[in-house]
Amino acid sequence: QVQLVESGGGSVQAGGSLRLSCVTSGDTQSSYCLGWFRQDPGKEREAVATISPMSTEIYYSDSVNGRFTISRDNAKNTLYLRMNSLRPEDTALFYCAAKRAPGRVCYGGYGYNIWGQGTQVTVFS
């Protein structure tokens, strides 16, 4: 199965931007639904954005819709999350996630079962 390694987290002032990257390896990226999730201590893990193998189906949570953009480059085996207009409440550990796509719905956060190690995003006011 695919392995996932995130990068691009950091500390940024409110209103700023960051771009997260997730490099996949070990299997064909285009066979997988991919997504970004986040978790703050004491809270449940939340699906932020998901994307189907050919980028035809994209989901955003209400809290990030209009500010974040998910994209993927299957030729480069990389998933991205562009985050604009960041807010202190976006502070969390962000995870890249995957699930095998054939016959499955990518939209939303259900059933993702392969995880990266996470990258921390901290937004200060």
Image: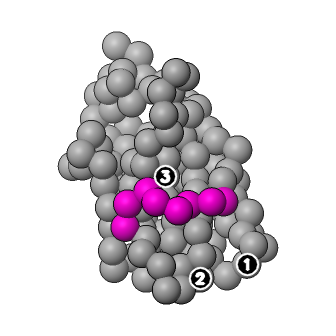
Give the amino acid at mark 3: Trp
Q: Outermost residue toward the right?
A: 26
Give the residues drawn in magenta, as a range: 107-114
Mark 3 or mark 1: whose residue is earlier in sequence: 1
Q: Are marks 2 and 1 in contact (CB under 8 Å)?
A: yes
Residue denoted by label 1: 27
Mark 3 lies on a secondary structure that is: strand
Q: Residue at x 53, y 86 (%)?
A: 102
Task: Describe residue 84's horizontal placement relative to residue 9 as left or right.
Answer: left
Q: Residue at x 44, y 42 (%)?
A: 46
Residue 21 image point, x, y percent:
56, 54
As for residue 111 lying within the magenta part, the answer is yes
Residue denoted by label 3: 36
Mark 1 lies on a secondary structure that is: loop
Query: Rounded to the nearest whole Å, what is the CA distance between mark 2 and mark 1?
Result: 8 Å
Residue 88 image point, x, y percent:
36, 21
Mark 2 or mark 3: whose residue is earlier in sequence: 2
**Which of these two is toward me, 68 or 31?**
31
As for residue 65 lying within the magenta part, the answer is no
Q: Residue at x 49, y 47 (%)?
A: 37
Give the amino acid at mark 2: Ser
Q: Is residue 87 visible to the viewer in this orientation of the structure? A: yes
Mark 2 lies on a secondary structure that is: helix
Query: Rounded to the nearest whole Å, what is the CA distance between mark 2 and mark 3?
Result: 17 Å
Q: Main secondary structure of the magenta part?
A: loop
Hey, which quadrant is residue 86 in on the image?
top left
